[in-house]
Amino acid sequence: MTKKLLLCDCLGSQRVERDAISAATGLNCTKVMTHACGKELPRTADHLAAGDLIIACQQESRLFIDLAEDTDVEMPAFVDLRDRAGWGDDGADATPKMAALAAEALLGAPPERTIDISSAGACLVVGSGEIAIKAATDLAATLAVTLLVPHPEDIEPGGAFDVVCGELRSVTGSLGQFALRIDRFQQTIAGGRGAMSWTDPRDGARSSCDIILDLSGGTPLFPTPEKRDGYFRADPDSQPAVAKAVLEASHMTGTFEKPLYVRLEEPLCAHSRAEQAACSKCLNSCPTGAITSAGEHVAIDPMICAGCGACAALCPSGAISYDAPPVATLFARLNTLASTFRKAGGRDPRLLVHDDFGDEMISLAARYGRGLPSDVIPLSVTALAGFGHAEMLAALATGFADVSVLLAPRSDREVLAQEAALADAIAGAPRVKLIDVSDPDALSDLLYDRTASTSIAEPILPLGTRRQVTRLAAKALQPDEKIVPLPDTVPYGAILVDQDACTLCLSCVSLCPAGALGDNPDKPQLRFQEDACLQCGLCVNICPEDAIALAPQLNLTDAAFTQQVLNEEEPFACIECGSLFGSKSTVQRIIDKLAGKHSMFSNPDTARLIQMCDNCRIQAQYHSENNPFASKERPTVRTTDDYLNKRKDH
């Protein structure tokens, strides 16, 4: 059944062109209503009953969901055409943008991968004084509460919760699985009269809990504490903050679904090889500490991961990919928005990327301010930091004139700035802007005052991995360029080899995690395929001669897909059999260092062994006078007759 789009001009406050939207999207659009959530609600109910409905109103979604539940019909989908398109102040026709947003709403997202988290309600309250005691008392009605105080004199006996004394040494884990280590740990001794008795203090006590309420007022127990599930922290001097934290903690019992934000393919990871460090971009960027080193690859704790997406944007090999939703879904959204906008008659659209913070900013700007210009298409994403250079370039190459990223107060500005700079370098012009404002009017003014660029004449279809899409976009944006120079620490480039220093030991070949470096089994050669190089730096770290350097660039020619010879030498021929082995320079270097200078190669005969292949060297050693493998003459084999004759003699 064809999806139907319910249109409403919201009491005549916006212009909605039904036929143009239907022609550009292929949707069966209803007659434009004026008050779908009010006087015309019965008509809305009729459309809901027909099923497969998309309602072009986000503000009253709760009303329409309740209506669907009351009438026992299929739940509708929603797309916001009013705040994001209809309420603009430039007077231009917003139909192309409405069509683009409506077409995007048709795209289905793959099911989300989740993991279950169970919390039994064991809560640790950290703090002292009346505030902590009251919070523990309030939570004791719904949770199993233990109050941790720093000193025994901070608490009096009695109460509906357990009390322990000590200092938190370390805390790991998240909701349902916090692991604690406590120094100076003391417990109360039940019974007796007078002051509360305590056990002797001891260090290194271990315990666990499901929830932590931190009212200590000190340093947070975790990096980016707001992203740690099950950890609630409030300033003890702020009663509203404490009350909010207590309320949130009281609801953290039961089983919860946590999204699995990222996917890790360990064989692709270029973290290290043979205990030599290589790429650590994800480790350096993870704000929650969910990523740790696990030998030759990294490990991601899904319980701690908050889904910021920075690791996926920075991963050079694609070992880490964002999965909520996958990047292919995002590429499809970009292509749908741009192509539908053009199909509806629009030109040179601009993209505004934002998260939940941006949703509220756009809504406020539309209702009380100038709204968005008619050529600015908003794109809401789950993880703003996950919108990296590949996604930015994909947007430009699918037909957007420029890309603006609206930063939220807690956005990872460093990662986004780095990715924007890389996208601009590959695009050949400053086409990506970071908007760091928190005032809706300032956002509108900035977008209205900015002069739009011109989009490319021949847009691409973004298919493949992030690296493949980046290369495809670069060729579309700079069709005449062959080599695009890039800043340092990027995941694209070549390597430079000092041929005078390189001994062709090929240690770099054996450890290259991407297979960009190779050898020739028939000849001493070092080969390199630039398209596969991750610029992880492992070859630089492992080279014993310091003969390798990185050259960040993006090679847009077909030569990037072929193996180029970086260094080669003539092979050395065995002086006995003529078999080729090693290289002339290597053999000569060994001769210079060992012949006549080492006890094992002190005379000419032993020195000749250096110039022999493995087989001839063994043969020469075996037949030499001072053969280290020689043994005494083998004894004569004794037969049965020998034993019988010996018995007769006796």
Image: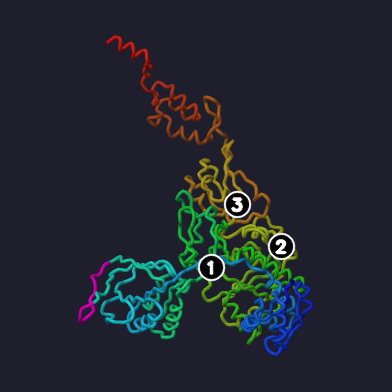
Instruction: Give me the residue at 75% from left, 63% from top.
Output: 458
Q: Magenta residues?
A: 191-202
Residue picked out by circle 2: 460
Which part of the image, by quadrant, shows the C terminus? top left
Nearer the observer, 182 or 591:
182
Task: Report the Cα–Cα distance between label 1 and label 2.
Answer: 32 Å
Instruction: Give me the residue at 37% from left, 15% from top.
Output: 640
Q: Residue furthest front?
A: 72
Nearer the observer, 83 or 502:
83
* Mark 1, other Cα within 10 Å: few <14 / some 14–19 / many ≥20: some
Q: Secondary structure at mark 1?
A: strand
**Disc 3 residue type (three-letter):** Ala
Residue picked out by circle 3: 532
Residue picked out by circle 1: 259
Task: Report the Cα–Cα distance between label 2 and label 3.
Answer: 22 Å
Q: With respect to residue 450, does 489 lie above or below?
A: above
Q: Residue furthest top?
A: 649
* Mark 2, other Cα within 10 Å: few <14 / some 14–19 / many ≥20: many
> Which label lies toward us, 1 or 2?
1
Is residue 445 visible to us here?
Answer: no
Q: Quadrant of residue 6?
A: bottom right
Residue 196 within the segment the image draws in magenta: yes
Q: Earlier in the sequence, mark 2 or mark 3?
A: 2
**Residue 440 at what x, y percent from top left?**
60, 82
Main secondary structure found in the magenta portion:
loop
Nearer the observer, 496 or 131:
131
